[in-house]
Amino acid sequence: MPTRTERAERRSDALSKQRIVEAAIEILDAGGEAALTFRALAAHLATGSGAIYWHVASKQELLAAAAADVIERVMAEVVRRKEPRKAIRALAGGVFDAIDAHPWVGTQLAQAPWETALLQIFEALGGQLRALGVPARSQFDAACALLNYILGIAAQNAANARAQAPGADRAAVLADVARRWQSLDAAAWPFVHQVAAQLPAHDDRAQFLAGIDWLLDGMVARR
Amino acid sequence: MPTRTERAERRSDALSKQRIVEAAIEILDAGGEAALTFRALAAHLATGSGAIYWHVASKQELLAAAAADVIERVMAEVVRRKEPRKAIRALAGGVFDAIDAHPWVGTQLAQAPWETALLQIFEALGGQLRALGVPARSQFDAACALLNYILGIAAQNAANARAQAPGADRAAVLADVARRWQSLDAAAWPFVHQVAAQLPAHDDRAQFLAGIDWLLDGMVARR
DNA sequence: ACCTGAACACCGTTCAAGT
DNA sequence: ACCTGAACACCGTTCAAGT
């Protein structure tokens, strides 16, 4: 039973790629990748599924646009810092937080690696590496290594989010894995046994940034 | 028109999870992830699609099993080396090659990060890090960083394979991207401009291993 | 130019029925 | 115990028809 007001609202904000992308992000955040269907999206936008195709060529393009939207917001929000190491850490941390908040971005990030969103990160990383004193001949490899490392957590976070039920208790899941690790044969799995106790309480973000630091240390050491 | 010989063959190798996984790997290698459907698999195995469900619970389980199969083969083939740095490089290189040959493994690897296949890599990495002299308190973070970095190329290779047509010319694709980079505004994209020329000829594997080296350098330097 | 929604060609998965 | 294959409940995408 649509009231006149409701209809007026619908008409006032006509369909556009940006509106579709925003709706897609809402659905993705609320229900994960599986929840985003053209039928759900059409219902959300109070239109027919075919209408969406007027503004967006395919689901692939829609997902890429949604991920680009999130990453561009991160790039805009990351405060520009003078000190290159801090700048790189801030950038990596920002991407980490974005993927943590929108795990579905993780799957998309690697999908179009040379498109604008990731290219922005790449450009920023490269500039800071130069400022850090990494020699010119290594800068390309170095920026790729950092980007690759960032894509690693992207993929992992996305996979974790997909594997776990939307409301799953992270601590409980980790405790469960740790228990499984501890029940393995200690002679065959000495390292896994050794670190099992550290798993439940470990800080994902700090661990991620530790890797960034090691990479930067290595890059600077070989200058 | 099945001959008597053909029918005999079919009956002799009855369905089993291992046979299903092998057939799935063949299809995945030949046609990528999109090609693996239960209908295609059933046709390949000359059976009904329902029969597969007697041995395998879901497509997700099938993909995980196929990926585990590939990774386990890598772990068995990687020659055990005495020198820890060489051992880690060999391990990482082996995983790289496996994902290069079977790009669909990349998507799966992050999917069940604490399952056996990846846990084997994790255990091996941890043992070598200890041998390398990385302090005990850092070993967990260090092994995770290496694993994360490895998952990064896994995700990238998988995405590249999915994006490109099966018979696509890698050199041509890279040359195309490089040309696009060069056409960007040099003032806004100085780094991208600078490295564009290096893109077409760059060695993915060497670049990947350079990152491993930087990580190890950093881990050892902070001992 | 933009939207509608039924129709098409697929999927993964289930299940009654067979052997 | 294991297999068959039709049926179910979905998909992404297309397209004739509307405004």
Image (cartoon, coloured by chain):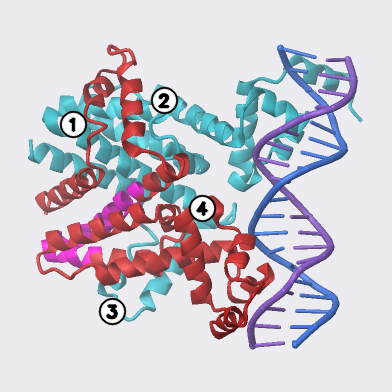
Chain colours: A red, B cyan, C purple, D blue
| Residue tagged 2 | B116
Element type where label 1 sits in the image: helix
- State the residue at coordinates (37%, 42%): B151
Mark-to-mark CA distance, 4 and 1: 34 Å
Please provide the residue range marked out in magenta: A125-153
Q: Earlier in the sequence, mark 1 or mark 2?
A: 2
- State the residue at coordinates (43%, 63%): A67
Q: Residue A213: percent from the left, percent from the top?
A: 16, 49
Mark closer to the observer (3, 4):
4
Mark-to-mark CA distance, 2 and 3: 46 Å
Element type where label 4 sits in the image: helix
Instruction: Pinpoint the chain carrying mark 4.
Output: A
Element type where label 2 sits in the image: helix
Q: Are marks 4 and 1 on the same chain?
A: no
Q: Are marks 2 and 4 on the same chain?
A: no
Q: Are marks 1 and 3 on the same chain?
A: yes
